Image: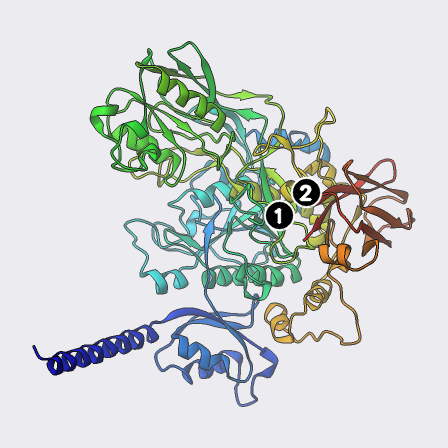
Amino acid sequence: MSRFTMLVVLVLLLLCLCHLSVATIGSSSNKKSTYIVHVAKSQMPESFENHKHWYDSSLKSVSDSAEMLYVYNNVVHGFSARLTVQEAESLERQSGILSVLPEMKYELHTTRTPSFLGLDRSADFFPESNAMSDVIVGVLDTGVWPESKSFDDTGLGPVPDSWKGECESGTNFSSSNCNRKLIGARYFSKGYETTLGPVDVSKESKSARDDDGHGTHTATTAAGSIVQGASLFGYASGTARGMATRARVAVYKVCWIGGCFSSDILAAMDKAIDDNVNVLSLSLGGGNSDYYRDSVAIGAFAAMEKGILVSCSAGNAGPGPYSLSNVAPWITTVGAGTLDRDFPAYVSLGNGKNFSGVSLYKGDLSLSKMLPFVYAGNASNTTNGNLCMTGTLIPEKVKGKIVLCDRGINPRVQKGSVVKEAGGVGMVLANTAANGDELVADAHLLPATTVGQTTGEAIKKYLTSDPNPTATILFEGTKVGIKPSPVVAAFSSRGPNSITQEILKPDIIAPGVNILAGWTGGVGPTGLAEDTRRVGFNIISGTSMSCPHVSGLAALLKGAHPDWSPAAIRSALMTTAYTVYKNGGALQDVSTGKPSTPFDHGAGHVDPVAALNPGLVYDLRADDYLNFLCALNYTSIQINSIARRNYNCETSKKYSVTDLNYPSFAVVFLEQMTAGSGSSSSSVKYTRTLTNVGPAGTYKVSTVFSSSNSVKVSVEPETLVFTRVNEQKSYTVTFTAPSTPSTTNVFGRIEWSDGKHVVGSPVAISWI
């Protein structure tokens, strides 16, 4: 081939490649995604009869084929639709359109509890009044299994007159599935289906029916009826009950096999507001976004304005810092702690040593004899064979043996299934550094126990040093009175708050480890396809479990104090939370074995009996939050996207995030300010207002900080005198830092007390 011919071929090849590239780009540009369109409702042109017509016209002006998925009336002013990138950009340029935001995908944050929280004494503190049965808890999750005994409506009166919702029929679900306890059930799938295709009814019900279990578990935790003789395979046996047993439940199914989509979540929150729920519980979360881009935060703002408390899970991304979800200050963000109950299952080794673990295995009380023991990493030809992932174990090397698997990547229960499939007869599941010594129990399909990282390393040393290692597993059932408890769960997501570091999150922790609650009849307790067992109750863990605890407790407080705002209810839960055990020791963090901090536990562990009578509360209204957004320098368009109305920040007014009347303090110092300003110190001032919700009293302040504290804290005034209910008094706190801080963080508390009530606020001080 001549050089000229080669040149011609090369040019033609490049032209083909260019054509291919352009075609590919063109194809990509035609791809449609779901967008949520925020509009300035007040800017509707006079030529339109109503907003729906305006929305239709705006959409048709950029796309002949696009159809609206949802029209939103409460949580936002606007709609959702499928658009190309170019169509979305064109729509956003139109007059009256505030923003066109791409849809976000959210994920689920996956009997002893009432007694542990003191609710076994509820008759003395929470009178079972009609007001309590008028409270409605809305749960956004995977739906509901209405046949659960936890939805028994015996003893409940008629559905509250305030209820405006429905019980929607669908696949495997009819309106007759609701009753006076489960008063509403809806499902939202348009956003999911336009992204991932139609719901496969052979795998999940296109209705409010819960085929997953997560939704039934959270709903019954929040407000399940009293059920005698509940247990999982005999574990945790006793009386199961939700936090607010007389409250009503309304379920909104927004999560499907492929996830939970923001257009569906917003539509469900929109309906829940119309339906007149009093509390919204969302055990789900996504990545952190600015508040005006976060659909859950936007929907929660509208709910808050209607007097609805919104409780959300903090996430299961701990123990690393900045791992929180749902950090908007108008959301109650809940982390997870343990109970004083455990399910011990011991590993007994051939060298005579015994190690403790946990398990919910249902079968023989123990393996009948010492059996050959092998490490999965030595029974596989793959590099990650130690993780016992599907198809990685060599049957000849594990048959008839107990297998040690490392935790990570695939589900814990699936590892046991892999061992069983390969011929193994038992499993020891060892935590790695990511989970430390935290123990979470599972209903394994074969004799198995989970051990902590330290124990796992000791067992591995035995496996590598003994030429013929053997082991057996001994199951001990249920043990209560475990100390210390609670401790902060390692998986519980931690602060600081990555969006606004001056707002301390999480707000509080509640039980979230090994929680017994109602379950679906659609899958077994492990959720695995091969698990054919069916149970009425299941034991699972996550901040998904701690969130509905607080949702139910908020319902109790709402029933006892119908006039309290969402902020007042959250304040009561936070300021009465505890951070020390009865013996005076500090609340522990299982991930470190050391005292936990406000970045881990927020205000502390919830104490509902104390929260009923907090003495004083930190109250907040919608305009307070809008002033907070002004302090963040949000534009009028961004604020309008959240507030659904024009709210202009006054140019002459000085806004500060430190003025938000929050029940906690997150103090941030810039190192360059304290070290490079030439001054000896830097000061930050916080303003707070307390509202009296108890008897007249004189409250005096006290401050307690870590011994290494080099920050000066002054409170002015030091005494507040209240003479009547709903009287308000303000105070300021000045934090003064030295020019050369001796530590990265300082933690403490500010407490007001009249001798009967203690109104406590956590303080976290950071240098960045």
573 sits to left or right of 13:
right
Which of the 4 quarters of the picture holds residue 9?
bottom left
- Mark 1–mark 2 CB contact (< 8 Å): yes
Q: Is residue 369 above or below residue 216?
A: above
Q: Could you classify mark 2 by the number of other residues whose Cα lies within 10 Å: few (under 14), some (14-19), or many (20 or more)?
A: many
Identify which residue, 275 or 206, lies in the foreground: 206
Count of all numbered marks drawn on residues in the image: 2
Numbered label attached to residue 495: 1
Mark 1 → mark 2, Cα distance in angstroms = 8 Å
Residue 291 percent coordinates (x, y): 59, 63
Q: Could you classify mark 1 by the number of other residues whose Cα lies within 10 Å: few (under 14), some (14-19), or many (20 or more)?
A: many
Which of the 4 quarters of the picture holds residue 66?
bottom left
Q: Residue at x 20, y 78 (%)?
A: 16
Q: Residue at x 80, y 49 (%)?
A: 738
Q: Is residue 606 above or below residue 270?
A: above
- Which residue position holds label 2? 598
